[in-house]
Image: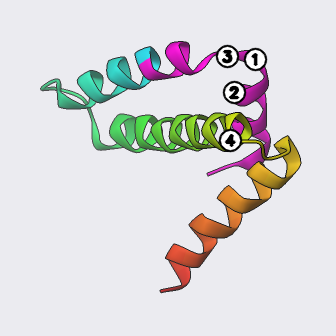
Amino acid sequence: MKIPVIRQLFQNTTPAQLETTLEVLEAFCEFRGVSEHEVDVAGEMITNICGALEVHQMVSEGAAEKDALNAFGQKVMGSIDR
């Protein structure tokens, strides 16, 4: 998870574009012959896309962009600490 990447995705893409990309990456990970490294890279991209989708949701509910990004970062860090 990289907050600067999530910010760029949030600012430059719509939720529909993110969801379509997410579907493609998930399908890619299911192909036979995809290496473990490729799955790891796709997984990192999936995490960032999901973060951007969550930030879109929070902003649509009235949160400021900065607050939404910080809240997502704290949520992820909190889940890692458990």
Dot 3 lies on which element? loop
Q: CA distance from mark 1 to mark 3?
A: 4 Å
User: Are circles 3 and 2 on residues that touch, CB within 8 Å?
Assistant: yes
Between marks 4 and 2, how big is the CA–CA gap? 18 Å
Question: Closer to the camera: disc 1 or disc 4?
Answer: 4
Q: CA distance from mark 3 to mark 2?
A: 6 Å
Inspect the magenta stretch and tell me whether residue 60 lies in it.
Answer: no
> Which callout, 1 or 4, points at the residue further toward the start of the chain?
1
Q: Position of residue 77 (x, y in %)?
A: 62, 72
Residue under the point 73% across and 38% down: 59
Residue type, numbered disc 1: Asn
Contact between labelled residues 1 and 2, with CB atoms less than 8 Å apart: yes
Cβ–Cβ under 8 Å for marks 1 and 3: yes
What is the three-letter code of the residue carrying label 3? Thr
- Residues in magenta? 1-19
Q: Amino acid at mark 4?
A: Glu
Q: CA distance from mark 1 to mark 4?
A: 19 Å
SS at badge 1:
helix
Distance (Cα) linking label 3 and label 4: 18 Å
Q: Is residue 7 above or below residue 3?
A: above
Distance (Cα) linking label 2 and label 1:
5 Å
- In the image, which is nearer the foreground, mark 3 or mark 4? 4
Q: Which residue is mark 2?
A: 9
Q: Amino acid at mark 2?
A: Leu
SS majority, magenta: helix
Of labels 3 and 4, earlier in sequence is 3
- Mark 3 = which residue? 13
Q: Are marks 3 and 4 in contact (CB under 8 Å)?
A: no
- In the picture of the structure, the residue carrying the numbered disc 4 is 61
